[in-house]
Amino acid sequence: MAKENIDPAREAVENRPGEDYVIEMLNITKEFPGIRANDNVTLRLRRGEIHALLGENGAGKSTLMSVLFGLYQPDGGVIKKNGEVVKINNPNDANDLHIGMVHQHFKLVEVFTVLENIILGVEPTSASFLKKKEARSKVVALSEKYGLKVDPDAYISDITVGMQQRVEILKMLYRDNEILIFDEPTAVLTPQEIDELMEIMRGFKAEGKSILFITHKLNEIMAVADRCTVLRKGRCTGTVDIADTSREELSRMMVGREVSFSVDKAPVEPGDTVLEVCGLCAPSRRSKKNAVTNASFNVRRGEIVCIAGIEGNGQSELVYALTGLGPVSAGSIRLNGEDITRKSIRRRNNAGMAHIPEDRHKDGLILDYTLEQNLVLKKYFMPRFQKGGFIKFEEVRRFADGLIDRFDIRSGQGAVTRARSMSGGNQQKAIVAREIDYNADILIAVQPTRGLDIGAIEYIHKQIVAERDSGKAVLLVSLELDEVMNLSDRIIVIYEGELVGEFRPDEITVQELGLYMAGAKKQKSGGEV
């Protein structure tokens, strides 16, 4: 493979003499069947810096960090710590070198408590007896020191995603790690939790800890990172000082072209009502109370309606009720005039509903199926793909190849790649491709760009607007305020399971929207309360 031309100024940033590098990954190469995930990549981490790692979905970022953490063995290159060559055969070796990692998909045991997860693998014992009291004291001290408040006795299955991430961070701190790897740490967080995490990272830096920070969000890189290394298709396109660069320059380095940060859409011209929700109540998954109370709204053809709220305020239960994944306590749901409140998921799909789910692993994909099997999940029983109960495999392959090309889904072995082995962003693109191709009357899109790079976000936003412009109805559920303001024609705010306000994006500011989302303001027919 020909070496890409790299700006000498960028190379100079990572090759300055006399630098105090705590970690050096030199000429790392890692191959999987059909793909070279890392191709001669060099990355150097200074002591006491926040170093961002940026790249498109499938560019090799998580693979590179997995090599550093001992989950993969490199096919070429060396790793140095404090100037000395080290061999990292597994995560235990990484922990021995004080290297810790918060994974994009958390590595927690749901039936264990917070405390049990934090000490798992390094349990303090005396005469073969577990010393939980000592461990608890250390966990409580760490949580107070770093502002990571957790309940040590809560079960992982009962706490929010944001709290689970705190547990993962405390796992690293409990092991006295000094080199902290964060793999897409903000992909599942609310705006408030993201701000808190940025402050925590700054605190780590002030203590002299070194952070490697994988993200797709350019604003976060500009806000918190000191330097940024950019990968594209497995190769390093350069390392830059954040003080000397811009979002536009980083996006060009990442995708190789200009990227638009705004969403272009024509004025809204809504048509007939597609989805009508009346007095809907849905039970909580964590208590006996209703998570959604008396929700009433509609979505019409040719418009994008967004449900905006802080995570944990009933959005998940609302979407589960609408799509048939969860129960309805009271109220009704009508799709194109048909009452679907008690209908099956397939009946709702056949009636004109598509769904990009919040949890791609739990509700979006069968991870041990191939990419082509996942892409045809909602259509395999149709005459195009089966005859007499036998699958037409060649037709499935043609269909999958078409979506892979159209949505730029990257995988090592194409259509036959196992979904589990794909990057999180490409898993998300596979789901988006399947649901948009379904050509439904309404698209329910929950966090559709979670974990996607800036180029993929731009493309997915255009696809959602195209759905709207073609006369489809779109119900968007998002925690990203920029996405809410840019894509929506109407915004409905949900707080503690109630719909507390409805606005057009041009009549509310981000700050005011945040007040409604936090419950500080509430809209009623007679005015604001």
Image (cartoon, rainbow, N blue to C red):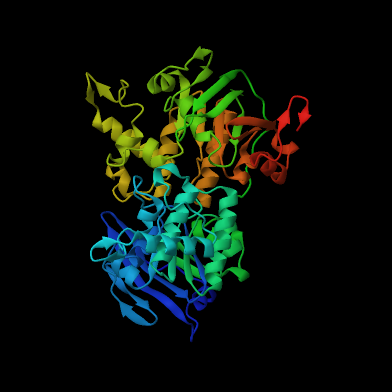
Residue at the spot 43% in from the left edge and 70% down from the top edge:
179
Q: Quadrant of the N terminus?
A: bottom left
Look at the image and tell me whether residue 203 can be seen: yes
| Residue 129 % position (x, y) | 26, 61
Q: Identify the residue at image location x=47%, y=80%.
A: 15
Residue 273, compared with residue 263, is above or below; it is above
Residue 146 relative to residue 411: left or right: right
Q: How many marks?
A: 0
Q: Nearer the viewer, residue 209 or 432?
A: 209
Residue shown at 49%/47% (left/top)? 456
Residue 399 x/y as whole percent: 34, 33
Q: Estimate the x, y position of residue 300 in percent, counting from the top left.
A: 60, 22
Q: Quadrant of the C terminus?
A: top right
Q: Is residue 214 above or below residue 467?
A: below
Closer to us: 403 or 320? 320
For this view, does 230 lie left or right of residue 258?
A: left
User: Where in the figure is residue 256, as x and y percent of width and height?
Assistant: 51, 58
Q: Is residue 56 visible?
A: no
Q: Residue furthest top?
A: 338
Nearest to the observer: residue 208 or residue 152? 152
Which residue occupies 31% across, 23% down?
Answer: 384
* Left or right, residue 325 beside residue 126: right
Name the residue at the right extreme. Answer: 526
Is residue 186 shown above or below 460? below
